[in-house]
Amino acid sequence: MTERGMLIVLSGPSGVGKGTVRQAMMNSGYRDFKYSVSMTTRKMRPGEVDGVDYYFRTKDQFEQEIANGGMLEYAQYVDNYYGTPLKYVNQTLDSGRDVLLEIEVKGAMQVRAKCPDAVFIFLTPPDIPELKHRLVGRGTDDETTIMKRVRKAADELKMMSNYDYAVVNDKVPLAVERIEEIIKSEHLRVARVMDRYMAMLADTGLAD
Amino acid sequence: MTERGMLIVLSGPSGVGKGTVRQAMMNSGYRDFKYSVSMTTRKMRPGEVDGVDYYFRTKDQFEQEIANGGMLEYAQYVDNYYGTPLKYVNQTLDSGRDVLLEIEVKGAMQVRAKCPDAVFIFLTPPDIPELKHRLVGRGTDDETTIMKRVRKAADELKMMSNYDYAVVNDKVPLAVERIEEIIKSEHLRVARVMDRYMAMLADTGLAD
């Protein structure tokens, strides 16, 4: 019997660097997971590739997918949809591989409700002024949008209580290292390995 | 305000190698914890030092300590007492340092009842035949004692359900690495860091 993979949810305030950390994870030595590419209706940014960074879809296409029950989670955020197609996640978990989701806070709460045994990691900015600095530095948003996001980030930070772990994104390689340690440790949680040990005892005739 | 240290409880069946793993942890690069020396009434083994490996005490002395309420946990095991003096543990946690206990399974359950936010790590043998092999190899016990312990180990393995993590002691350096990852990850658990983040938000005037 193949043990089912573990669902890892990486989330956090907009602008905290979720995408950068996720990409660094995919380029690191630790590759024992599959990344689930999200679907979005937002515009492609320079350097992004359809099917790699996101599945870029129209609003109509996205809403059709929702209607078909094909989304594990989705949320509207700054006038765009973001979401996770269900099929790839289930197939990969069933094959015994871990799946990494990098999703928005609202979507993470939907996964929490549906998959209580997933691992929920909340990426945090070193501090709120630093978050604002990053959004300005990205140069893709005007000042009103930035202030809206900073306020939202403060609100989202309070949502941390719904997560299992808080990882500060002070330096990307450090954040990646912490996340990898969390994943490895979570695989040792008794709730996840108990069945395997009981099967071993049964094999040696000592289960009763 | 100093954040309180974390209590780490390393336990597992007799003969699994708790002492070896604990000593390897104390000699490893990761030293961000204090080891709480246990008290026992068992005879000193060659190479052991009083106050380093254990506080070696008489049965009368140990029972006096119990009567004084000075033990965090204790258990009788193969006709000897083993236990943890309370005072050092509390002082060290209050100073902000983590404390590592390496204790028997019965004692660990007492700590669980008293300190629910401690981290409970269960060290497991790669398999039960391997455990028997180790006890025989140690050469300190006769066959009846060994069989008693193997049976006990199988029973104790079922007690894993009362722990947070199961770490297999296949190779000592690997077991140490896993335990260190668990400790670091546990320090990132939201339940442990939430207060610190809320204090940061309060400082930026964004808490409400």
Image: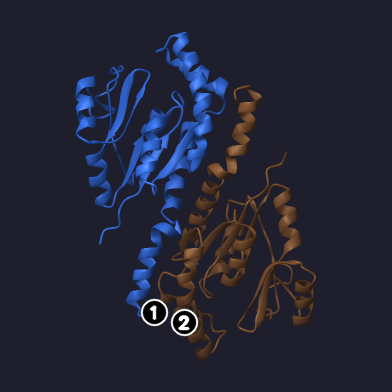
Chain colours: A brown, B blue
Q: Is residue A93 above or below residue A105?
A: above
Discs 1, 2: same chain:
no
Give the residue drawn at x 50%, y 65%: A123
Three-letter amino acid code of the residue under disc 1: Leu
Q: Is residue B99 above or below residue B129?
A: below
Give the structural element (helix, strand or loop) at label 2.
Answer: helix
| Closer to us: A154 or A49 | A154
User: Which mark is on residue B130?
Assistant: none
Residue A198, position as x, y percentages in the image: 61, 32
Give the residue drawn at x 51%, y 36%: B160
User: Which chain does the residue under circle 2 lie in?
Assistant: A
| Closer to us: A157 or B49 | A157
Three-letter amino acid code of the residue under disc 2: Arg
Give the residue drawn at x 66%, y 49%: A5
In this rendering, position of residue B64 left or right of residue A157: left
Residue A57, position as x, y percentages in the image: 75, 77
| Closer to us: A205 or B201 | A205
Q: Are marks 1 and 2 in contact (CB under 8 Å)?
A: yes
User: Which chain does the residue under circle 1 lie in?
Assistant: B
Give the spatial CA distance, label 1 vs label 2: 8 Å
Residue A9, position as x, y percentages in the image: 59, 61
Q: Is residue A94 visible?
A: yes
In this rendering, position of residue B125 left or right of residue B35: right
In this rendering, position of residue A203 left or right of residue B12: right
Residue B73, position as x, y percentages in the image: 32, 35
Which corner quadrant holds the N terminus of chain A?
A: top right
Residue tagged by mark 2? A151
Circle 1 packing at 10 Å, graded few (<14), some (14-19), many (20+), is some
Residue tagged by mark 1? B206
Which corner quadrant holds the C terminus of chain A?
A: top right
Give the structural element (helix, strand or loop) at label 1.
Answer: loop
